[in-house]
Image (spheres, rainbow, N blue to C red):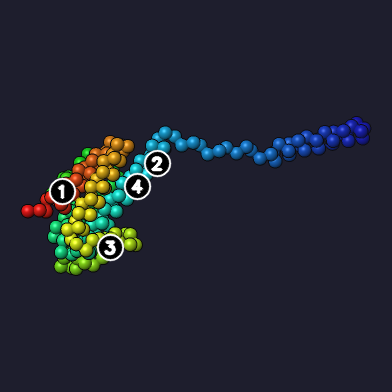
Amino acid sequence: MGRAGTVGRRALLLAGAATLGGCTTTPPRERGPEPPTAAERAARAEAELRRRSAAAGRALLERYDAVLTAHPSLAARLTPLRTSAAAHAAALGEGTAAPGARPTPSPTGGGPAPSSAAPSPASPSAGASAPRAAAASPTPPAVPADPAAALRELAAEVRRTSDIHTATLLDAPPEYARLLASVAAAGAAHAYLLTEGGRG
């Protein structure tokens, strides 16, 4: 074979290598993120609903703490209700109950029974006027100087939180909706005990 044939083959080999090299250096087309599935969207919506419900429960707990700090003389009346509110906030934050378990009505108006893990206010003998560790907001809610007015404002906050839970349960999954309904019913009973129930 002549020199011309050798040169021709070499040119073809070089051209083929260049073609292959161009193919391998072309970056693959990137695929965008997969859109969330219906189950993932539902899970995210439920997580956000639980977050809002737990935040409402914690805000109410802070209101109890502020009133107890401003008016330690109300400790005997408010401590059982505050303990129940703490249990409700903890249950709403956990979001799930043990399989087959049902919320046990509390002595103060229904809802999940207070658990040992729920924070409790300081006892009057330990100094009920001391700030409580459960209050998470840097600025405690303002409390009227008059105890009766403070109770009225607390009762209004309890009713407002109960209304929030009642509205939220319409979009909640069945198990969590039952918990919200129980907590809302307990809130309605607590509001009564804070106002009408304390008269006479």
Determine the secondary structure under disc 1. helix
What amino acid is at disc 3? Answer: Ala
Measuring 82% from the left and 33% from the top, which residue is drawn there? Answer: 12
**Depth check, front residue: 31 or 50:** 50
x, y percentage for residue 147?
A: 18, 61
Residue 141's label in the rendered image is none
Question: Is residue 30 depicted above or below 158 in this figure?
Answer: above
Secondary-structure class at tag 3:
loop
Q: CA distance from mark 1 to mark 3?
A: 27 Å
Q: Is residue 73 visible?
A: yes
- Residue carrying label 1: 192
Of the pair 156 and 14, the residue shown nearer to us: 156
Contact (Cβ within 8 Å) of mark 1 with mark 4: no
Q: Earlier in the sequence, mark 3 or mark 2?
A: 2
Q: Are the residues at dot 4 and dot 3 in contact (C-beta closer than 8 Å)?
A: no
**Which residue is denoted by mark 2 in the rendering?**
44
The percent position of residue 81, horizontal first and vertical second, equals: 18, 53
**Residue 93 makes an appearance in the image:** no
* Picture coordinates of residue 145, whole percent (x, y): 22, 63
Among numbered discs 1 and 2, the one appearing first in the sequence: 2
Badge 1: how crowded within 10 Å, few (<14), some, or many (20+)?
A: some
CA separation in Å, label 3 and label 2: 31 Å
> Mark 1 or mark 4, which has the lower sequence index?
4
- Disc 3: which residue: 133
Secondary element under disc 2, as helix, strand or loop, is: helix
Q: CA distance from mark 2 to mark 4?
A: 11 Å
Count the labels in the image.
Answer: 4
